[in-house]
Amino acid sequence: MSSQRTFQHDISVVLAGEAGQGIATVEQVFMRTLKTAGYHVSATKEYMSRVRGGTNTTEIRVASRPIAAFVDRIDLLVELNPKAVDHVKNRLSSSTIIIADENSVKDLPQLVLTVPFARIAQELGDRILSNTIALGFLAALFDIPSQELIDQVRRSFGKKEGDIIEKNCSAAQQGFDLGRQAAFKHQLSVQIERNPSVKKEMIVGGHEAAALGAVVGGCNFLASYPMSPSTGVLTFLAQHADEFGIVVEQAEDEIAAMNMGLGSWYAGGRAMVTTSGGGFSLMTEGLSLAGAIESPMVIYLAQRPGPATGLPTRTEQGDLDLALYAGHGDFPRAIFTPGTLKDIFLLTAMAFDLADLYQVPVFILTDQGLLDLYHTLSEFPAVTVKASNHIVKTTPDYKRYKFTDSGLSPRGIPGFGEGIVCVDSDEHDEGGYITEDSQTRKAMVDKRMKKHGLLLKDVLAPQFFGEKDYKKLILGWGSSFHAIREAMEQQSDLDTAFLYFRQVYPFPDMAIPLIEKAKEVVCVENNASGQFAKLLRRETGLAVHKKILKYDGSPFSVEELVRQI
């Protein structure tokens, strides 16, 4: 088998090793080094729910264009764990190049480049340095000047004490030298076009995009109990709480977190809670309280596979029904389903004003696959909605639940004006006082439900991709966006179009004629029951012709969607 290999447009590099072996460090430094060199990069993770051991992988894609989708294909596999090859064997092909320690070579049909990771790391005094040696090896294959690599290593380990910085620099340099030798010996060449403007871009992940969106939306209070994959937003805002003027509270549980958030809105704050499915289950009584007292609330629900604990560190779009039907009784809500980092930022910012304006709970539904996605980004989209408090100064005769034609009552807060701001979880009259009068009860329910019509006026239209004369229409929401888009680009089928939903509830009626026009409608979802397809049928009476469903804990890959679409 000839070892000569040239990569021209797109290369997939997978790092595989044990938890605690420093894969995340290699990923971060390598991505920054590639960006500085002018490459478009993206990274996705899959990791086990354990502190040590097992096998975790990170896929880093390097391309001549912006990319963000997950692919099954592995061009370069860096094996830092002897079990790595078995872990990803279904993704290997005859053209995969494996970079492995000299002591873990197996009889494989693929080209194996042996590197003395363990021996050099031991000579330098710390076995963890194997990851930095691998970093240097990869940088050489991408023809990155060694000094640029060393600068990135120094920047990454700059706060470490003792000789840790110099040991890592030495490890990176030795790995780089071995990479140069291997590239020459096996005629390996990366000829992916570089773009100088990428050097000025930032590398952003889903957690940061959501946190920054909340800041732009005017969030000044966050209450949460840690639960993957939502914890990244909590930790990011906690680290920067003073800079952003946000109070961050790690509550004793999710029940307390939701009630703290409602207390913040009652006092005039702009609060958000972050959680995942199991944690949100504890918040549902508080969600109904928000419906009863007509309180704004922003709920950042990061999905993971259930039921129960499920797969704590894997991905799924399994909580749409949960967000849609959670809470007892009838009350309006809105559900955003971003599928890109730009949309996470934009929709999180918009959620605060929508919640504040209409006095309803607003969900931002994400998942692990999207939150742990990192890629180069030139800028965030402009947010045209200003972070405005829709609060009135109360008068002595103020009534918190005053009947109005629109269903919206003027929202006051304690201490701002002369009125009493009375709220109650029991059914109440206009003044907020408990009542069991049947006519008042019906009038209050009708008043609250009128806000669903108001939300429909502000609903986000789905984004359409494709030619106007399509015959097949793909429906997708949330994190399936990038894989569907790239699969369609590879197929170049003019008869197939894609409709991407960034908001699924209230259902955007402007999508109905686009769906009715198609001869075949295919719905792509990361769950077992086709939850969005059921929502579509309930809201519009329209049924999809085919469902492409996945629920094994991993995201859709481009290749499998090409096959199935």
Image (tube, helix red, strand yellow):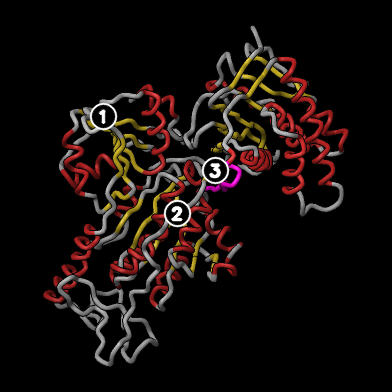
Q: Earlier in the sequence, mark 2 or mark 3?
A: 2
| 86 or 543, nearer to the observer | 543
Left or right: where does residue 530 sit relative to residue 407? right
**Quick one: 407 or 382, which is closer to the camera?**
382
User: Given the image, on which type of amino acid does mark 1 rest?
Assistant: Lys
Numbered label attached to residue 192? none
Q: Earlier in the sequence, mark 3 or mark 1?
A: 3
Label 1 secondary element: strand
Task: Identify the residue at horizontal 49%, vertical 46% (top origin).
Answer: 371
Please provide the residue range marked out in magenta: 197-205
Relative horizontal placement of residue 196, taking residue 183 as reference (left or right): left
Looking at the image, which residue is at 24% across and 45% down?
535
Which residue carries the number 2 mark? Answer: 345
- Please name the residue that numbered disc 3 is placed on: 376
Q: CA distance from mark 3 to mark 1?
A: 34 Å
Sequence-wise, the earlier of marks 1 and 2 is 2
Tag 3 secondary structure: strand
Asked if the residue under mark 2 is in contact with the one under mark 1, i.e. CB atoms within 8 Å, the reply is no
Rendering coords of residue 446 (x, y %): 16, 68
Amino acid under disc 2: Phe
